[in-house]
Image (cartoon, grey):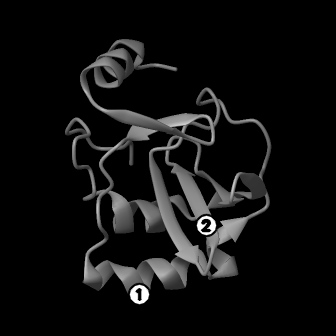
Amino acid sequence: MFEHEQFDKERTSKQVIERHGWLFYAQPLPIEAADLDPLRAACSDPTRFHLPCGIKMCGGFHPDYQLSWKQGDRSFDVQFCFGCGEARLFMGDTLAVEADISRRFFLDLLEHYHGQRPEHAFAR
């Protein structure tokens, strides 16, 4: 909502893909081995997720990160928006869960995975 020019520059100058209606860089970033267990634990810990508290004043959900994995022939994606502190879990192409997140906790785990993303810190 607030960075239209930067978004357009990234969208037109980098290779992107669409996932669940949102654009992401096409080149995935592998998760470092040391981060796998903490991310798995966090994503399966119900205390890290909360019932959505309604409309946020940030312009709405706009994911900063997506984690993707497969279990057998099923695919899963969880998208994190650090602007509004929300996550959405997709099972295949179906939205399964929307929740507010422990924003600071997930941001600490993921913020160093910026790859092609412009260098800038999220609002803390």
Q: Is 36 placed left or right of 118 in the picture?
A: right
x then y, percent, for residue 94: 76, 53
Along the line of sight, the residue nearer the viewer: 116 or 94:
94
The residue depicted at 42 percent of the width and 15 percent of the height is 4
Percent x, y of residue 74: 65, 71
Q: Position of residue 17 (x, y in %)?
A: 44, 37
Specify the farthest residue to the front: 73
Check disc 2: other Cα within 10 Å, few if <14, some if 14-19, many if 20+: few
Residue plotted at (24% across, 21% down): 13
What's the mark number on residue 75?
2
Residue positioned 42% across, 40% down in the render: 24
Give the residue type at disc 1.
Asp
Circle 1 SS class: helix
What residue is shown at x 52% (from left), y 85% (from top)? 41
Q: Secondary structure at mark 2?
A: strand
Determine the CA span between mark 2 and mark 1. 19 Å
Crowd band around label 1 with a 10 angstrom C-alpha radius: few (<14), some (14–19), many (20+) = few
Name the residue furthest top.
Answer: 5
* In front of the other: 51 or 95: 95
Q: How many marks?
A: 2
Asked if residue 81 is positioned above or below residue 47 in the image, the reply reads above
Q: Examine the rendered structure and indicate whether residue 28 appears above or below residue 39.
A: above
Task: Please state which amino acid type lies under the numbered disc 2.
Answer: Ser
Say whether residue 38 is left or right of residue 83: left
**Circle 1 residue:** 37
